[in-house]
Amino acid sequence: MKLVFATNNSHKLDEVQNLLSDKIELLSLNDIKCSEDIPEDYDTLEENALQKARYISKKYSINCFADDTGLEIESLQGRPGVFSARYAGESKDSEANMNKVLDELKGIENRKARFRTVIALIIDNEEFLFEGIVNGQILVSKTGEDGFGYDPIFKPDNYSQSFAQMSIDLKNKISHRGIATQKLIKFLLKQ
């Protein structure tokens, strides 16, 4: 089965490809020659994931899935949430985003946070949603060199390392995207 992941983020592609069986051929937006900026106009992860998947499905007539992820910090009333990628501005600069979060949390003891991913799958014109959540804490400083996005400042509950310190295999087992992707794969393998 060929399936498009509506992203050009090589980190996301690597994480998901690492989880897929040989029965599913994962394609990126580059593979289908899609270079346009897919809109994300909504205020929820679910709506944004569906919007991206619908766009690719309709324009390219292909089975696909898209995700949207948010870092939700309790003491910031759930921010950055759906705006996680562009929290510090439209340039989507991960360093600036992390620095903004760390600045906003200076002096705040409650550092509870969660990552939440929603995957929208469109297969044979039917829509399905899969969610993954991982709870954790925001660290006081960046720790680790691997990963991407907010990984250097997020430490999942019951672990001593940030996501940026973990191997990709461990992160995939416990991460929000890994959990949502496992649900997606389990569903696809039943098809």
Image: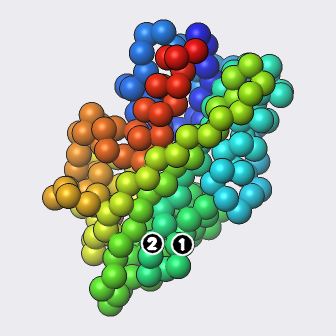
Q: In the image, is residue 179 above or below residue 164?
A: above
Answer with mark 1 or mark 2, whichever residue precedes in sequence: 2
State yes or no: discs 1 and 2 in contact (Cβ < 8 Å): yes
Q: Position of residue 103 (x, y in %)?
A: 41, 81
Using the numbered discs, state the Cα–Cα distance from disc 1 to disc 2 in whole angstroms. Answer: 6 Å
Quadrant (top left/top right/bottom left/bottom right) for the N terminus: top right
Q: Residue furthest bottom?
A: 107
Q: Does residue 70 appear left or right of residue 167 in this picture?
A: right
Q: In the image, is residue 133 above or below residue 105?
A: above
- Looking at the image, which is closer to me, 88 or 124? 124
Q: Residue at x 29, y 51 (%)?
A: 164
Residue on which disc 2 sits: 73
- Residue 93: tell me if it is visible: no
Q: Residues within 10 Å of mark 2 (few under 14, many from 20)?
A: many
Q: Residue furthest left?
A: 160
Q: Secondary structure at mark 1?
A: loop
Residue on which disc 1 sits: 79
- Which corner quadrant of the image does residue 80 belong to? bottom right
Q: Position of residue 130 (x, y in %)?
A: 55, 40
Q: Residue at x 48, y 67 (%)?
A: 72
Kindly identify the amino acid type of the residue bearing the numbered disc 1. Arg
Q: In the image, is residue 87 above or below residue 176?
A: below
Q: Residue furthest right?
A: 59
Q: Residue at x 37, y 25 (%)?
A: 18
Q: Residue at x 70, y 50 (%)?
A: 48
Kindly identify the amino acid type of the residue bearing the numbered disc 2. Ile
Q: Does residue 2 appear left or right of residue 171 in this picture?
A: right
Q: In the image, is residue 167 above or below residue 85?
A: above
Q: Position of residue 43 (x, y in %)?
A: 71, 62
